[in-house]
Image (cartoon, rainbow, N blue to C red):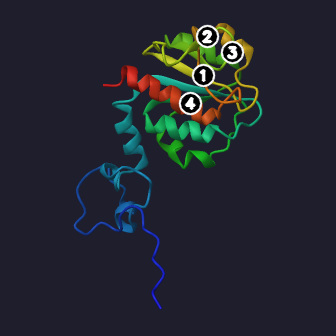
């Protein structure tokens, strides 16, 4: 009888001695192995070292998402923001959010909290960042034809109700994602990925 195939292991095992003399490396990971979901270039690096390296080349856009009803998509947004190396993620409303979808990528991101839209807007103004609302509302500009500001905060609503009217009224730009099916909206996590990739296509070098 043939043996069942074993599940493919992720990462690397313990590092052979002598260990490299590199302050970025984590002694426990060197000893026990590194099974994290990170790029091979970051194997055995401490989380702090990875964050510090990412900080040297983060893109100048931020992502914010409203969290009035404990939105389950925030983890997915954080994970995607990590993939595109956003400068930061901002949770507006409830402080607690479901981290499961982030797949621990929040360890490598700067995640901030704002009590309400006023607080987010004040922070964006202090950082000279344009607020770009992403929602399918009257008067919105198709994101496929819009030029996104290089320094900006992409703001997303929660599943169902979308963005609060206050954000759309106060944003420098309101963009929508053109759709061709029967529903009026797409998953907030998917919308965030499309918007971030649009920024990447326009500004990343």
Earlier in the chain: of badge 4 and badge 2, it is: 2
* Residue beneath the point at 23% across and 55% down: 21
Q: Give the distance between the C-alpha atoms of the residues marked 4 and 2, in whole angstroms.
A: 17 Å
Q: Earlier in the sequence, mark 2 or mark 3?
A: 3
Residue marked by disc 4: 192
The answer to whether residue 147 is left or right of residue 64 is: left
* Mark 2 lies on residue: 171
Residue situated in front as seen by the camera: 54 or 69: 69
Residue 153, x across and y down, in percent: 53, 19
Q: Which numbered disc flags the more N-terminal residue, 2 or 1?
A: 1
Neighbours of disc 3 within 10 Å: few (<14), some (14-19), many (20+):
some
Tag 4 and tag 2, C-beta contact below 8 Å = no
Say whether disc 1 or disc 3 marks the residue closer to the N-terminus: 3
Pointers 2 and 1 in contact (C-beta within 8 Å): yes
Going from the N terminus, do you reach mark 4 or mark 1 first?
1
Of labels 1 and 3, the one closer to you: 3
Which of the labelled discs sits on residue 155, or is there none?
A: 1
Q: Residue at x 34, y 68 (%)?
A: 14
Residue at which label 3 appears = 137
Where does residue 19 sit, x and y in percent of width and height?
25, 63
* Closer mark to the observer between disc 2 and disc 3: 3
Circles 4 and 3 in contact, beta carbons < 8 Å: no
* 54, above or below 196, in the image: below
Residue at mark 2 to residue at mark 1: CA–CA distance:
9 Å
């Amino acid at each position: 009888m043939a043996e069942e195939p074993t599940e493919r292991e992720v990462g690397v095992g313990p590092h052979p001695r002598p260990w490299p003399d590199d302050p970025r490396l984590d002694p426990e990971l060197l000893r026990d192995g590194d099974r994290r979901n990170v790029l091979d270039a970051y194997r055995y690096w401490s989380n702090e070292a990875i964050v510090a390296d990412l900080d040297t080349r983060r893109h100048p856009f931020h992502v914010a998402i409203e969290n009035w009803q404990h939105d389950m998509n925030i983890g997915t947004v954080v994970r995607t923001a990590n993939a595109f190396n956003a400068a930061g993620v901002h949770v507006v409303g409830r402080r607690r959010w479901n981290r499961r979808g982030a797949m621990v990528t929040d360890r490598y991101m700067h995640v901030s909290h704002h009590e309400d839209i006023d607080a987010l807007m004040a922070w964006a103004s202090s950082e000279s960042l344009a607020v770009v609302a992403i929602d399918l509302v009257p008067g919105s500009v198709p994101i496929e034809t819009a030029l996104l500001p290089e320094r900006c905060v992409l703001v997303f609503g929660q599943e169902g109700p979308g963005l609060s009217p206050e954000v759309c009224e106060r944003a420098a730009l309101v963009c929508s994602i053109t759709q061709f099916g029967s529903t009026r909206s797409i998953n907030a996590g998917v919308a965030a990925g499309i918007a971030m990739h649009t920024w990447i296509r326009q500004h990343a070098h």
